[in-house]
Structures are given as C-alpha cells and as structure tokens.
Amino acid sequence: MKNSHKIALTISSLSMLILGTQAVTAASVDGDASATVVSGIAISQNTALSFGNFAAGTGGTVVIGTDGARSQTGAVSLSTVDAGSQGIFDVTGEGNATFAITLPANATLTSGANTMTVDTFTSDPSGTGTLSSGSASINVGATLTVADSQAAGSYSGTYTVSVDYN
Amino acid sequence: MKSVFLLYRNKLSSSLLLIGVLFLSTPHFSLAAQYSVSTNGTAFATVEEPNPHSIYLPEWPELVLNEQTIQAISSSNTDHPFQFSFGGTPFFLYTVSIESQTNTISSGETYFELSNGVDSVGFFDETGLQSLQLKLLLEKALSQLTGLGQINIIIEHN
C-alpha cells in the first residue's frame, strides 16, 4: 500500500472515530423509566343475602334494604324467627382506587320445582365504590316476589356481583 | 482493518444504546391491571307452612291521630273509642302497651285506656286473633285542644 493510501485510510478512520464519538455523546441522555403494577381487584362474599322467614298468604313481596331492614308488601306475613339480612361483599385492591359495581337484573331462588324471583337489586355504595386503604364493603339489598300460596320450603339461589377498576 | 472493524462495532453498539435510551426515556408509563372480577353471592328465603299456628304478630305501624282523625272518630269530646285487632300464635300470651306523646296536645290532659273488658295482658284464643277497643279520653272539649298527638300500640308475645 502506498504511503498516500495509508495516510488517507488513517484520516478516514480517525474521522469515523470522531463522528462515532460525537454520536455516543449525543446519546448520553438520562432517561427515567418507571412502572406501576396496581394490585388486582378481588371480591368475595362476606354475608349471604337472606329474606328470612315469612308466610306467603296470597302473595306480595319481601324487600331487604342495603341496611338489612326488612319490609313487605301485599299479604306476606313476616316472621320474627329469622328477620333476614342484606348481602355483604368484601372488595380488596389498590388503595384509594375507585371501582364500578355491577348488579344482576334478577335471580331465581328455588326449592325443588318451586321458584321465586329476586330483582330490583340495590347496593351501598351505589354504582361506584372507593377502596379506602385498599378495601371496601358492598351492601346489597333486593326484592323477592312471593306468589299467592307460594309453596312452603327453604329456597336458595345465587346472583353475580361484579366490580371493575375505573 | 481490525481496528476499523472495532470502531464500526462500537458505533453500532452506541446506536443500539441510543435506541435503548430513547425508548426508556419515553414518558412515564404504568402497567395498570384494568380488569374486572365477579363473584357469586348466595340468597336464601324460607316460606313457612300456612297453618294457624304459624300466624305471626304483624308489624303494626304507628297510629297517628291528628286533629282531623280525632274529629272523625267521634263528635263526643270525652269518649273516643278506636277499634283495632291483631293476630298472634294461638294460646300464647300477649301484652298490649300504649305509648303516647300527649304533651303535643296542649290545653288539656289526654290519656288512654283499653276497654271491652279485655286486659292489656291476655292469651290468644284458638283463632289467634284478638280485638281490642282503645278509648281516647279527653279532659276538655275537643275544640279546646290544639296540636298533634301520636299513639303507639305495642303488642308483644310473652
């Protein structure tokens, strides 16, 4: 290789080194990166929704409020043997996060071949709850429709409560 | 040539580093768990057998007697009977007590007594039904009284 070529190659290499060095200098920026993984939301039943004991008579409704208060309409006679209670659900998740509550439109209680319909579900809090310190409780009430001469027996069923992070 | 190759390799590494830095320097991001959960709650109810022995004391509403009601009960100003009935478990003891807030009726004393020869404590007969008459006794003429009065009739099994 001629000396002139060696010199040219050396200059070229030095130029690339300089250019490359400049590019690395331009890239030395401090970047912050962070990630937040929130706690997953969870729900579990604490207390079952109970309409208690009653005599059907010619029918009517039994209403359980979100505070557990029970009332009736129509000819239903409420028994003091079991006054019923509201449903209570425990929710856990990210502290101070809010969540949406979804209640079912209706549910069915069965005793053998006999059924009763539960609807008009209500909750406290209603619609949206807050996970104060990462936990919250949902109180659920509903209305049970009792038919004329509803067959005696112990009725049971399930209903679905959903919670979503807002 | 080896040194030139190393220079190119270093430059490539620097470029990749730059890309990495640029990627990491994007604005703060979160890995939020946006999801929902559901659970099945249980619901219960017990329908009692419809026999006479399962008649339960009704939850009596408060009886509110206002001036119009008193006037409607009787034109007399000294004796105002008010008939009421209630049910319970046959052969069980019951107690009837009266709570009144007569101090809201001014300008005259008011008190109550149960009549019809039935004591405030008794047993339900085989029908499980009982009827009592409540007398509202006013010391002064109705026209002299003003205000509202409330009577609570409390019936309990013993």
Image (cartoon, grey):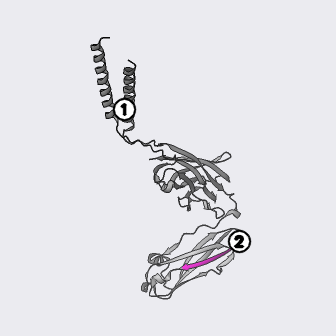
Q: Which residue is mark 1?
A: B18
- Disc 1 crowd rating (10 Å Cα; few below 14, some 14-19, many 20+) is some
Residue A6, given in percent of the width and then of the height, sits at: 30, 15
- Is A63 left, or right, of A154 in this rendering? left
Pinpoint the chain carrying mark 1: B
What kind of residue is marked 2? Phe
Identified at 61% across, 67% down, the residue is: B58
Residue B43, given in percent of the width and then of the height, sits at: 61, 52
Q: Which residue range is magenta in the image?
A: B88-99
The disc at residue A101 is none
A90 versus A3 height, above or below: below
Pinpoint the chain carrying mark 2: B
Q: Which residue is mark 2?
A: B92
Q: CA distance from mark 2 to mark 1?
A: 90 Å
Identified at 67% across, 53% down, the residue is: A154
- Foreground residue, B139 or B19? B19
Identified at 45% across, 45% down, the residue is: A36
Residue A155, given in percent of the width and then of the height, sits at: 65, 51
**Residue lying furthest front:** A3
Q: Are marks 2 and 1 in contact (CB under 8 Å)?
A: no
- Is B1 left, or right, of B94 in this rendering? left
Residue A63, given in percent of the width and then of the height, sits at: 55, 57
Q: Does the stretch in magenta take in B93?
A: yes
Q: Quadrant of residue B118?
A: bottom right
A105 versus B98 height, above or below: above
Q: Quadrant of residue B11?
A: top left
- Foreground residue, B72 or A44? A44
- Disc 2 crowd rating (10 Å Cα; few below 14, some 14-19, many 20+) is some
